[in-house]
Amino acid sequence: MATQMREYILGVASDLFSSRGINATSVDAIVAKADIAKVTLYKYFKSKEQLILEYLREYDDKLWKRLSEVTAQQGDAASKLTALVNAMLDWIADPEFKGFAFINASVEFPQSESPVHQSSMEFAQTLRNTLAGLAKEAGIKGADTLALQLSLVIEGAAITERTQRSSGAVEHAKALAKILIGAAK
Amino acid sequence: MLELLDSQWFLRMIVAGGKTPAAQLLAMFDIAGNWIAAPGIRELFAKAYPANKPALHSCAELKAHLTGIAVKAKAQNPPILASQLVILLQGAIAEELRNPGAGALGEAAKAAQAVIANACHSDQKQRRALRAMGGVTLAAVLVAAVSLHPLARQMLSPAATHVAAQQLPMPVAAMPAVISPDEMEQVLLLQRQIEDGRCPAPELLVLPQGQATAYMNVINARTPENPAADRENMRAFLAWFKQARSTQCYFPPINGHTNVAWTKR
């Protein structure tokens, strides 16, 4: 029962965070949407910040689970790299996509000492490192350069897709990533 | 702020940024990088996009403009190349704003170079092959027509063929016979006027898909998949251009009262 309530509150908060923005969502709004007493929320989460961090952690878990499922199906590092980028781009193509939580959060919390900012930068860094690691494993010399280029493609596609739904941005970005990986070999 | 990427200033800077179309496409990243690095711009960005308003802008004008340059660069699929370059630019600007000085725009330019080379290189090979193939086919058709039909022999009198050969530039040889030389000449004349800067380039992204493809097929000497439909589309394109864009064409007087150079030749 306790964990169910906790997850319920986190679910409601996550929806509001991703649709309205983190700063624009007050604890009162979460309480009202969830139809619970404020005391109940504070029983499970000691602050709004904790709620935000849990939201980011859950989002990251979900994304990484999907990414590792996709890469696990591939044999060599080069196809893993391509599959990882494609999976990120497919994530963007979801009509529910409202920007990567970690990118949005880092914009909303620009102060580098904020735990929310640190947590969101951590994801971006892990992604970049994973891309570079796979590129190195695939025998690509400029692995870090390629990783940066691929992350630019992913973020640019996310922006383009959000400004113009189904304009083919995701498909164009996949072709783009393929060319870049091919050119780096 | 990001609306500036669609402004006439930015579009003109791109064209002024390089001698060849490919160099212009690449110059875009430099121009954007210099712009962001200019004093005070970062502060303006922070003001224009507070935490609850993400920096999102679709860059539709820019994309249309890049498509036009990609056509001149003879890219295989200009709208896709334009879309890919905008993706790189958007990603690089976001990264540059977040991590100043990490060289995101320079890295994006390197990536763009690879993509442009890929789009334009394979096209050259393809066109060379097509031209060789098409030339042979057309020659065969002509030989057959001349030898079989007395009327055709009359039509293709030496004078007529001479004029046609003079007026029609190289790519015509590769075009399938279904499109009439007259129509082809119209499109190629239009293409010359656009390249000379006398007529506005058509916004290929806003055209119906078939018409844009038909136009591209002619100027790139590609064989259409469906020649009959292609011909209809090309007629529709020419009619549209005449109706909607030809008023924007400007032809300098030929009576010697102006010495403005309209061409770079």
Image (cartoon, coloured by chain):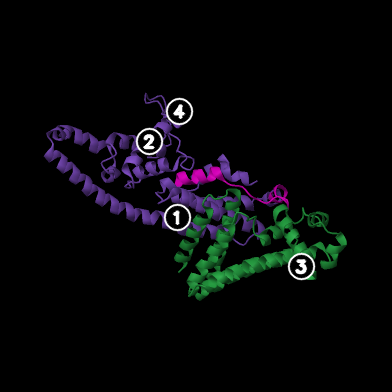
- Badge 2 amino acid: Leu
- In which image quadrant can residue A100 be found? bottom right
Kindly state the secondary structure of the residue where label 2 is placed.
Answer: helix
Q: Badge 1 local density, few (<14 within 10 Å), some, or many (20+)?
A: many
Compute the Cα span from label 2 to label 1. 25 Å
- Mark 1 vs mark 3: in front: 3
- Badge 4 amino acid: Thr
- Residue at label 3? A4
- Residue at label 4? B247
- In which image quadrant can residue A112 be found? bottom right
Dot 4 and dot 2 within a common chain: yes
From the viewer's perspective, is residue A141 above or below residue B99? below
Q: Earlier in the sequence, mark 4 or mark 1?
A: 1
Q: Residue at x 62, y 62 (%)?
A: B102
- Asked whether residue A140 appears in the rendered view, the answer is no
- Asked whether residue B57 appears in the rendered view, the answer is yes
Q: Badge 4 local density, few (<14 within 10 Å), some, or many (20+)?
A: few
Q: Earlier in the sequence, mark 2 or mark 1?
A: 1
In the rendered structure, the colour chosen for chain B is purple
Between A14 and B8, the one nearer to me in the picture:
A14
Between B109 and A42, the one nearer to me in the picture:
A42
- Badge 1 amino acid: Ile
- Residue at label 1? B116
